[in-house]
Amino acid sequence: MATQIVMNGRGDSRHIFEQKDSKRLAEAERRLKNLTGQGFTAAARTVGCDLKVVRIFDPTADETLFYPRLVGG
């Protein structure tokens, strides 16, 4: 199972999907394209528990974190 975590003003929303399910993989890839198109940064957790910024969908990633663009004032 893989998880996409989308940070927002109220906390986060989680989208869990089976990596072997082609329909869910397509939804996850669309979600990545949609969110990064809106300015979110996507980062996948690596084996060492570090985060690596990703710009294309990685179907093998167990966890991807999306966080919104930071805006200074």
Image (tube, grey):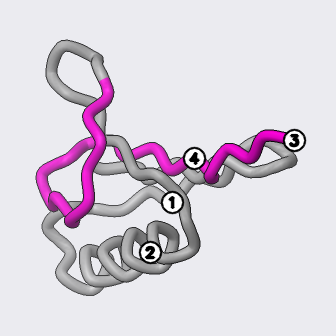
Q: Is residue 19 magenta?
A: no
Quadrant containing the C terminus is top right
Q: CA distance from mark 4 to mark 2?
A: 13 Å
Q: Secondary structure at mark 4?
A: strand
Amino acid, disc 1: His
Q: Secondary structure at mark 2?
A: helix
Write down the residue under mark 3. Answer: 73
Q: Nearer the viewer, mark 1 or mark 3?
A: 3
Query: Residue at horizontal 27%, vertical 86%?
Result: 23
Q: Residues within 10 Å of mark 1 (few under 14, many from 20)?
A: some
Q: Are marks 4 and 2 in contact (CB under 8 Å)?
A: no
Query: Residue at horizontal 18%, vertical 81%?
Result: 22
Mark closer to the chain start, 4 or 2: 2
Mark closer to the chain start, 4 or 3: 4
Instruction: Using the image, tell me which numbered label, if any, was put on residue 52.
Output: none
Amino acid, disc 4: Tyr
Write down the residue under mark 2. Answer: 31
Query: In the rendered picture of this protein, how many numbered marks are placed on residues?
Result: 4
Q: Is residue 56 magenta?
A: yes
Q: Secondary structure at mark 1?
A: strand
Q: Nearer the viewer, mark 1 or mark 4?
A: 4
**Residue 28's x, y, as percent?**
36, 72
Which contiguous range is marked in magenta? 51-73
**Residue 21's x, y, as percent?**
20, 75
Q: CA distance from mark 1 to mark 4?
A: 14 Å
Mark closer to the chain start, 1 or 3: 1
Q: Secondary structure at mark 3?
A: loop
Mark closer to the chain start, 1 or 2: 1
Instruction: Using the image, tell me which numbered label, if any, was put on residue 67.
Output: 4
Q: Where is 35 relative to 51, above or below?
A: below
